Amino acid sequence: YSSALKNFAVTLSKISSDLIFLATGPRTGVFEINLPPLQPGSSIMPGKVNPVMPELMNEVCFKAIGNDVTVSMASQDGLLQLNAYEPVVAVAIMESQGLFFKTMPLFRTNCIDGITINQKVLENYMNRSVGIVTALNPLLGYEKTTELAKEALDSGKGILELIREKKLLSEQQIKDLLDPVKLTSPTGPTKLVE
């Protein structure tokens, strides 16, 4: 059970750290999402929103991971069928479980439920992405898409801008092939090229 709590903690800590990273910004970070502002800001950076709930979850996860190490050490130190360290095993497991029971509802209501996306930032990333040329391979071929990617990187222009300038695709083809929803679906845009 302790190792299951630890595995849960590792996964939850990863999610919390990803939320912190995705909310960095607004000018020099990723800034794909907004976390709910729960504090007036940073004492050294006015206007900054501290990611206090993901940080809290990380702290709880770190404690649960540490508690699993305690359980492992106490378990390995038992002699034959006797283990004098079962009390610390019980305390460590109950502490981890209790921390999750207390903080998970807070994390959901004070963080997860209030996350919003930065639509304009995401649209800009999509429009400026060089990686979308991969979706054009079936129609334009590898050489042409490689040239487009290189030109986009060299010129600072977006792939869509270059496609329109060069009249490589119609607006309908652009809409069909490079729609963000279709690009991120399991079937992808290639079904449209058949």
Image (cartoon, rainbow, N blue to C red):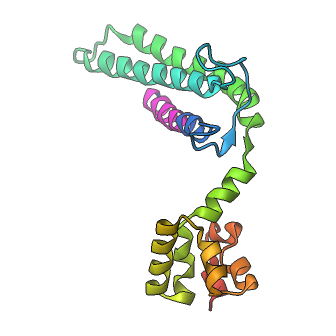
The verdict on residue 11 being magenta is: yes
Q: In this picture, is 100 found above or below 162?
A: above
185 or 27, nearer to the observer: 27
Out of 57 and 163, give the one closest to the viewer: 163
Count of numbered labels shown in the rendering: 0
At 73% from the left and 21% from the top, the residue drawn is: 38
Left of 11 or right of it: where is 107? Answer: right
Residue 135 falls left or right of residue 171: left
Write down the quadrant of residue 31 in the picture: top right
Task: Characterize the magenta stretch by its predominant secondary structure.
Answer: helix
Between 138 and 155, the one nearer to me in the picture: 155
Q: Residue at x 49, y 81 (%)?
A: 145
Residue 83 position in % (x across, y down): 31, 12
Above or below: residue 24 compared with residue 187: above
Residue 74 visible at all = yes
Q: Is residue 85 magenta?
A: no
Most extreme residue toward the left is 80
Residue 95: percent from left, percent from top: 53, 14
Residue 166 position within the rendered picture, expressed as x and y whole percent measured from the top left? 61, 85
The residue sitting at 46% across, 30% down in the picture is: 6
Residue 69, position as x, y percentages in the image: 36, 21
- Magenta stretch in the rendered image: 2-14
Residue 187 visible in this rendered orientation of the protein = no
* 150 is higher (above) or lower (below) than 97: below
